[in-house]
Image (cartoon, rainbow, N blue to C red):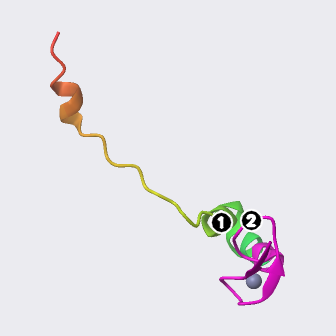
Amino acid sequence: MEITCPRCATTTDVDFYGPCASCRDELRATMGADGVAAAEAVEYEPKMNVTPNAVALKDD
Ligand SMILES: [Zn+2]
């Protein structure tokens, strides 16, 4: 599909939404694989903390 790169605003053809190929190369060069993963995680949703009480309340 065709998208506008969220990083450099270049119109590019990609398989999924995210930075264009040149931006991905740049991110990989500057931040390593973690930077690319972070850039591609557009809909990242942090997990809720599990409360220790949930374990403590378990009654045998
Ligand atoms: Zn780009």
Assess whether residue 13 is covered by the magenta stretch. yes
Residue positioned 71% across, 89% down in the render: 8
Quarter of the figure with residue 32: bottom right
Q: Marks 1 and 2: in contact by CB < 8 Å? A: yes
* Whether residue 49 is situated above or below residue 11 in the rendered picture: above
Q: Is residue 57 left or right of residue 31?
A: left
> Dot 2: few (<14), some (14–19), or many (≥20) neighbours within 10 Å?
few
Name of the residue lying farthest toward the front: 1
N-terminal of the two: label 2 or label 1? 2
Residue positioned 54% across, 63% down in the render: 43
Q: Which residues are magenta?
A: 1-25
Q: Is residue 44 left or right of residue 6?
A: left
**Image quadrant of ligand 1?**
bottom right
* Whether residue 18 is situated above or below residue 33 in the rendered picture: below
* Whether residue 34 is situated above or below residue 48 in the rendered picture: below
Name of the residue lying farthest toward the top: 60
Residue positioned 30% across, 40% down in the render: 50
18 vs 50, nearest the viewer: 18
Q: Amino acid at mark 2?
A: Phe
For the residue labelled by badge 2, is the local secondary structure a helix, a strand or a loop?
loop
Instruction: For the C terminus, give its image quadrant.
Output: top left
* Marker disc for residue 40: 1
- Residue 46: image location, x then y, percent: 43, 55
For the residue labelled by badge 1, is the local secondary structure a helix, a strand or a loop?
helix
Q: Amino acid at mark 1?
A: Glu
The residue where tag 2 is placed is: 16
